[in-house]
Image (spheres, rainbow, N blue to C red):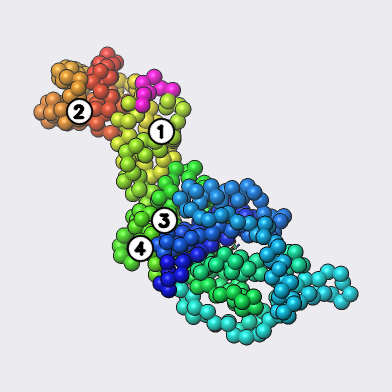
Amino acid sequence: MSKVGKKVITRFPPSPTGGLHVGGARTALFNYLFTKQTNGEMYLRFEDTDKERSKKEYEKDITDALEWLGIDYHGPFRQSERTALYKRHIEDMIKKDYAYISKEEEGASDSVIRFKNPNKVVLFEDIVRGTIEVDTTDLGDFVIAKNINEPLYHLAVVVDDHDMGVTHVIRGEDHISNTPRQILIQEAIGAERPIYAHIPMILGPDKSKLSKRHGAKSTIEYKDDGFLAEAMINYLALLGWNPGDDREYLSRDELINSFNLEKAQKGGAVFDLEKLKWLNKEHLLKLPGEDFEDGVSLHITEDIKKLPQYSKERLFKVIPLIRERIHTFKDVEKMAQEGELEYFFEKPDYHAESLMWKDEESIENTKKHLEHVSLVLSGIPEEDFFNPVVKKAIWEYAESNGKGNVLWPMRYALSGVSRSPDPLTLAEVLGKVETIARLNDAIAKI
Ligand code: GLU
């Protein structure tokens, strides 16, 4: 309920002439957050009066994205299915002399329907931008329909908002200039004026309106890129709004509870992919274990799954290491491509010299250290083969012989690469049998 006790009705009315870009998603989200907070209802309405450019595939792109983001709605409704309603209003407006059929050229058969502009000053309150005053004289007698059966945007939007009982119109600032025309039509058809909130544009890094040119994608593509819906709505909510304190990570419930249109900013909001990635990582770090495992499993590549030692159990042991490294689930694929995952699932291949730490005097010493490590680790029961136990078993020896001299060859023997987690962590992930096997392989190589 709103403050005055009337049920809040909002609407999200995209034209399905393209997919849902992030600007549209942000508008849908602001409507959603406001609607949830006030226990209202949001209508999804496809403004598909442009028959040539409106496509079902775009409708699907839009509803897929809304579903992914968890933005629920009433509908969808389609303007193309509501022509009888517009026709009634157009006829009524003509009858009451609010509109007229106008021959566009002397003697021409082409005609349009124009609104009879009362030429007055329209004043409206905008939640974000305050009082806005416009003299409508300059707008002339604007066109509201191509003919009785083909309404144009201003007419259809006013009739629909009225018919659906819309109480709040929350939309992009680019629609401010449309508002005076729509208010005039509302007054003509006797519709109640909704409360307006025009939210700032989303800008690219060069401060011009965000577009494909800036690499902006369709919202659903961020899903394919491995972003979490919860991170995406968190990020979109911060484009033009903030909770008024220093919080940046906000869960869905926190967003719903703290959202406040009055705190929306007036200036444009710059879309920053790095910040989205950062927020995604924050959400990934807090994701429940099972959900994280599911995300990783979806992005682990076939090349990794084909490796001889690949198993779900081994993968689950690697998962905490993956969680530290990635910003999106897509990064799991990148880790695989860059060879950061292979050695967990197959014996490494390398030259014996690589086992030697830079300060070590001889390869024989390296061999001796590996033999010692292999021997003491053999004494640990398999079920106790955890990082701290492994550490305890070798630490004193490593300290007295030089940590690099002992730990480097151990790590190299286990991973075969110079950048990998520390050898204790690797030992725990690989387990006792595989750790000893890889250490002995290294000894044999020398
Ligand atoms: N169909 C319009 C658009 O796609 C929205 C109109 C409105 O919110 O009033 O921008």
Q: Nearer the viewer, residue 197 or 357?
A: 197
Marks 4 and 2, Cα distance to the nearest angstrom? 44 Å
Q: Earlier in the sequence, mark 4 or mark 2?
A: 4
Label 4 vs label 1, nearer the camera: 4
Q: Which residue is mark 1?
A: 297
| Disc 1 packing (10 Å; few <14; some 14–19; many ≥20) | some
Marks 1 and 2, Cα distance to the nearest angstrom? 24 Å
Give the extent of the magenta segment. Answer: 306-312
Q: Amino acid at mark 4?
A: Ser
Label 1 vs label 2, nearer the camera: 1
Q: Nearer the viewer, residue 11 or 388?
A: 11
Q: Which residue is mark 3?
A: 235
Q: Amino acid at mark 2?
A: Phe
| Disc 3 packing (10 Å; few <14; some 14–19; many ≥20) | many
Q: Does residue 168 appear left or right of residue 52 in this picture?
A: left
Q: Position of residue 304 (x, y in %)?
A: 42, 27
Confirm or deny contact between disc 1 and disc 2 (CB under 8 A): no
Ligand 1 picture quarter: bottom right
Q: Which residue is mark 2?
A: 386
Q: Amino acid at mark 3?
A: Tyr
